[in-house]
Image (cartoon, helix red, strand yellow):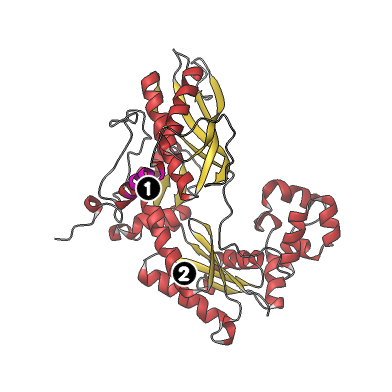
Amino acid sequence: MTPIFALVDCNNFYASCEKLFRPDLAHTPVVVLSNNDGCVVARSKEAKALGIKMGIPIFKIKQQIQQHGIQVFSSNYSLYADMSDRVMRTLEDMAPRVEIYSIDEAFLDLTGIQSAVSLIDFGRQVKHTIDRWIGITVCVGIGPTKTLAKLANHAAKKYTATQGVVDLTDRKRQRKLLALTPVQDIWGVGRRLSARLQAMGIHTALDLADTSAKSIRQHFSVVLERTQRELNGEPCIQLEQIPPTKKQIICSRSFGARVTSRIQMGQALCEHVTRAAEKLRKEQQQAKLLTVFIRTSPYQNNTPQYSNALSAQLSRPSDDTRDLIQLSMSLLDQLWRDRYHYAKAGVVLSDFYDIGTYQAELFDQPSIHTNSRQLMNVVDTINHSGRGQVFFARQAVKKGWAMKREHLSPAYTTRWNGLIQVN
């Protein structure tokens, strides 16, 4: 049976989440900012119509914000994650197999579903259900490969006549759309690769599809060859229901205010380690290698510059936050230099092991923490319940270095005090 894939993509996701709980902003331009309220990372359709570019620093559009009444929001990650989870759980109820590709995208396996309902009708049903149940608008692209489904989704967003759903299973429709699509718009190609392709006379997706797969492999890579084959309807990229295990976990943030105190730097690193350890436990892994890095801002030429990183191994793999904090503080003691204005710090966990698989050496030190797993499970359960917060003594209560988020919206769906009150 010929495989059929669908790509469901939320439109302007961050901006849509902000608008969802603010009906008064239904037709108002909205932008969402990056960490420390630096640059625009999401735009509503109204903001796009005003010419607001992705990635532009906020200070460059202050005049436009005032002139057009653009509403500005800081990134509210807890809200976006919760709304994403609602969308993905709804999709899992509607399709037999789902691959969560990103926070706002998912691939569905629709193989065989056309025997019961037309693919266009199913796509419209998905779109209607997500809109009605959650309030988020999506576009649906359908094709015999993941690359063609991605291309169909691109067309569903670009061409309003499609009403947000495109079925690209027909060969003639495929080639017509391929001829209209610049090669740089193909999933996984990008600007640098497209420049080399254009130098070979490959300007559209159809040009790439009609090029010999052998030639593509010789001049580029097997990855681009897979893309070329997928454009011709040959499935080469399978659905991944279980995400591959991470090779490393990185937690870092630029500071909202420069850090000059060793104590504050330690508090910030403890915050990063705690978050990294939570992610590690969620992956059901243990880490043996920890890297700590600190640096000043490379964009401030009038201040002394310093950047450094150090790594060290635990005596045995661990997912216990206490082990990781202790090692990170030891590394910070070696890294720290006074008289610098630090702009960023972070930690990297790597060298992962499945729980219970590490073979200890004869002289390895046994863990000093009894019932470690039970304690960490209790901490995670409390912290994810939304009813309270447990933190380690080295973490700060007041975080003067915390990320700047002056336009942060409430946690409408994850905190009791963020619930909307109706009079």
The front one of 167 and 98 is 98
Residue 163 % position (x, y):
50, 73
Q: Which quarter of the figure is the C terminus placed in?
A: bottom left
Residue 45 visible in the displayed image: yes
The front one of 229 and 21 is 229
Residue on which disc 1 sits: 377
Residue 143 % position (x, y):
63, 72
Residue on which disc 2 sits: 91
Asked if residue 378 is among those painted magenta in the image, a careful observer would answer: yes
Q: Dot 1 surroundings within 10 Å: few (below 14), some, or many (20 or more)? A: few
Give the mark nearest the N terminus, 1 or 2.
Answer: 2
**Residue occupying image coordinates x 40% and y 34%:** 322
The front one of 78 and 46 is 78
The front one of 126 and 308 is 308
Rounded to the nearest angstrom, the CA distance separating label 1 from label 2 is 29 Å
Relative to residue 236, is residue 218 depicted above or below? above
Relative to residue 3, is residue 66 depicted above or below? above
Callout 1 secondary element: helix
Horizontal relation, residue 167 to residue 35: left or right = right
Callout 2 secondary element: helix
Relative to residue 178, is residue 343 depicted above or below? above
